[in-house]
Amino acid sequence: MKYYTRDLLTLLISLFILSSCKNPTGIGLDNNPGDSFYGTLNDTVTLKTVTLRDDSARSVIRVANNNSNIPSININQLPFGYYNDPVFGETQANVALAILRPTSGDIRLPQNAQIDSAVLVVRYGNSFVGDSLSSTYQLKVRQLDEVYSPNTIYYSTKNWSVKSEDIASLQVRRFNLKDSLNIVVRGSSGQDSTVKRYPELRLRLNNNFISSLLSHTLDSATVNSETGFLNHAKGLYLTVDQDAQQGAGGLATLSPTNPQGSDSPNFMEVTYRVTDAEGETDTLTKVFPIPVPTSSSTTGAPFMYMSSSIKRSFSPAIESQLASSAVNQTTVYAQAMGGLRTKVSFPYIDQLKGKKIAVNRAELVVYVDEENSSTISGPAPRLTLYRKDVSGNNQPIPDGDSRYVPDLRSQFNARTANGSIVGVRALGGLYDKERKRYIFTLTSFIQDVILGKVQNSEVYIAPVSEIMTNTIPFWPDITTPSSVVLKGFNPEDTQAKEEIRTKLNIYYTELE
């Protein structure tokens, strides 16, 4: 009963104070840290910041389960490429994919077919990090040596079994994510025409491989079923030959989805000619789709036909930090795709427990460490922040809970003065380019810590996609290749009251 009364009083005071603000949900947007109209400010709380390896990132979609309050994980793009980052080290992102049989007809080529072309087409995503000016990439396609299973949950750490033969090779001077392409296609009459397509990666496949894959000698009953063809084709594997690459490289993104509709933008297209008994030649095409992600209409199980696997070799500086996470680190790192996260602890916040205070506003302010950042890639446009429960499972911060049934104190679905949804600004974490910092709203979370309602007060910071604005992730995000170097907690800066420092601002009111 004691805590219930205190919580009610806290809520009333907080609502009264925040209701006088022009933008109560825009934490850190309209006002600078240090503004005193939120109450008494304590900005000298000791923190501990360290760099940790992140958990592996889910590489296929997750369907929401509203009964269990489990949010969906939507994957609109996947990382692909090789990047030797001078700060973070080497990262290689490969993409495995499944090709399905055409929707109708025999998948096999006629015995007298002459292949004109076989092309693998994969649409680009929207994100790129790395050297976009002077790097050259050598792309390769190989056949998987294991079957890609569309209803299997794959993670970024998946190590695929791949055949050694290259079935496609292409030198790329840059990943062209923005410019549409004019593609020459041959019609059934043999006439060529030009069509305009969205930015996409096109790789010419080896004709001999296609002849074997679609040979007329294959058993029709086996390969003309969906499962039979999938087991026969196994899948394809896109990779970058890092030994043949010139320059630092970069990480682009490939999209398994189609924003313009439900039809798949990705496919393998085989164009061939056949000559009949009268000597007439027809040009025909078979299209093998790589479907967009979907879920079973009966079980809700996800089906996804593309996934990324990530291989890393961190720089010596980061490896040194990972080996010494017991001590505070004044420079910390965060990398998406299940790479690195920053852990922030509040070792002495227990000193505030038992005090009769109402937290009116709490915000974690984290600055970019420009001195130790790369000059090639900029800071991640968006970071997320989450906590862990007593079982070690990731959980959202109550202030920015975007689940189907959110914490009642979450501002995610609240509206601002102009009527717009607060959305991701409820938690914050959007990069402020002018001040070179991120601000996270932790008001309800810090109040819970002070009241002893949460056992683990540590929070974790990691990059997430700036495009994904309909949710606040509390899981490793594979859909962005971004990273950031942050200023960790520095006791000397705190003692000197330096403005540009990582700090926890707690604005509070003392209760009688």
Image: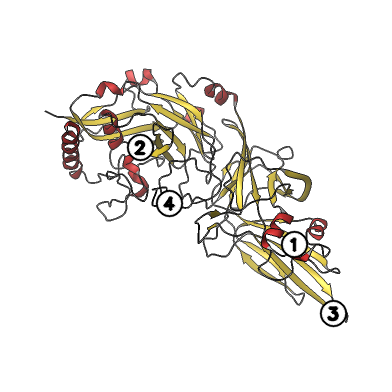
Residue at which label 3 appears: 280
Most distant residue in the bottom direction: 278
Q: Secondary structure at mark 1?
A: helix
- Circle 3: residue type: Glu
Residue at which label 2 appears: 440
- Judge the density around disc 4: few (<14), some (14-19), many (≥20) Cα neighbours within 10 Å: few
Which callout, 4 or 2, points at the residue further toward the start of the chain? 4
Q: Nearer the viewer, residue 483 or 384?
A: 384
**x and y percentages locating residue 59 in the rendered image:** 56, 46
Is 156 on the left-hand or right-hand side of 386? right
Which callout, 1 or 3, points at the residue further toward the start of the chain? 1
Quote the CA–CA distance across marks 3 and 4.
57 Å
Vertical arrangement, residue 275 with respect to residue 465, above or below: below
Vertical arrangement, residue 281 with respect to residue 108, above or below: below
Question: In the drawing, what numbered circle is on residue 222?
Answer: 1
Residue at which label 4 appears: 65
Q: Nearer the viewer, residue 377 or 226?
A: 226
Asked if one can make out residue 199 in the rendered structure from this viewpoint, the answer is yes
Quote the CA–CA distance across marks 4 and 2.
27 Å
Residue at image position (22%, 46%) is 22
- Judge the density around disc 2: few (<14), some (14-19), many (≥20) Cα neighbours within 10 Å: many
Q: Secondary structure at mark 2?
A: strand
Q: Nearer the viewer, mark 1 or mark 3?
A: 1
Quote the CA–CA distance across marks 4 and 1.
36 Å
Quote the CA–CA distance across marks 3 and 2.
70 Å
Asked if one can make out residue 132 in the rendered structure from this viewpoint, the answer is no
Quote the CA–CA distance across marks 1 and 3.
31 Å
Which callout, 3 or 4, points at the residue further toward the start of the chain? 4
